[in-house]
Image (cartoon, rainbow, N blue to C red):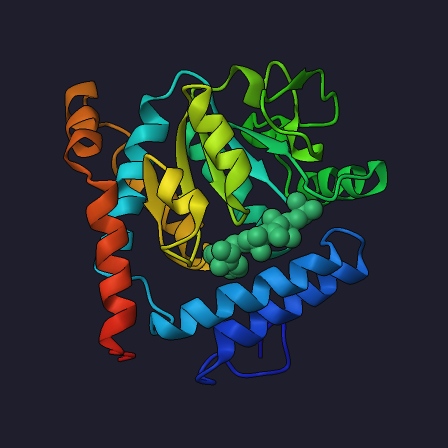
Amino acid sequence: MSEIDVPESHPRYQSLLTRHRIEEGVEKGITSKQGLIAEGRGEAFDYLLGERTIESADEAARAAAALLLLADRPVLSVNGNVAALVPGEIVELAAAVDADVEVNLFNRTDERMEAIAAHLHEHDPEAAGVEIKGLTADARIPGLEHERSKVDADGIGAADVVLVPLEDGDRAEALAAMGKSEIVIDLNPLSRSAQAAAVPIVDNILRAVPNVTRHAEALCDASREELESIVGDFDPDAALSAAEGAIRSGDLE
Ligand code: PTJ
């Protein structure tokens, strides 16, 4: 038996595990109540995609790994849903691509910021040389009026590549306008953040983050030219169309 009282062979195991982690996140003050609604939206799209990593999402995960390995200052952005669902996996990805992690919240309060940073620290980022940022908040993303504009100057403020999972589109658009390359993880191929991304990964974050790490580990000895050609060959519009096509085909496997 696993973390939930349901065998892993249960057909809805992943979805039940996700709900359990989000509920626990709300109880611990990590995830906002709105995070429950966001989870429901994601779950609906995951159901339509057959709760699997489609081929185009795997290609996007490989391009994301290459982009992160090429970056000078990569940062992985974490909100309350990401912290509840994949805290250890985010630290592992940051270690694999030499990135920092930054907490960035829509419903920002000091209590939630600290609870999320403490939750990430339980996964021993220091041992992997990963810094948890976001609490300094000494810079702003221009053109955004809400709390998500608050970033660390030496974190997202200075980043060239940012991983932006599970959020609405306006910050993704504002970061793109600042000239940053964005990798978005979002199960909705029509969302504004997926549309704004250089690399949209249309997959459940539970599958996508370990998959990017796996690709990064496989590519760690690749030359700069090879990494550049993986990124150059990736077509974000084709990836979004493929995901939409998979949803429309109704092939749930
Ligand atoms: O923690 P905070 O305060 O920063 O708030 C974060 C939430 C998630 C509440 C906020 O960003 C929000 O309201 O997001 P939205 O607008 O509901 O967008 C969330 C997107 O993530 C939707 O397009 C969902 O389809 C998608 N999504 C939800 N769960 C998953 C997901 N994508 C991948 N994997 C998931 N598990």
Residue ID at (38%, 57%) = 203
Q: Is residue 94 above or below residue 161?
A: below
Q: Quadrant of ligand 1?
A: bottom right
| Of the pair 249 and 66, the residue shown nearer to us | 249
103 to the left or right of 48: right
Residue ID at (44%, 59%) = 204
Residue ID at (38%, 71%) = 51
Quarter holding residue 3: bottom right
Quarter of the picture containing the C terminus is: bottom left
Q: Position of residue 77 (x, y in %)?
A: 56, 36
Residue ID at (36%, 55%) = 189
Q: Is residue 86 above or below residue 11?
A: above
Quarter holding residue 112: top right
166 to the left or right of 21: left
Q: Position of residue 56 (x, y in %)?
A: 23, 54
Q: Position of residue 90 (x, y in %)?
A: 53, 43
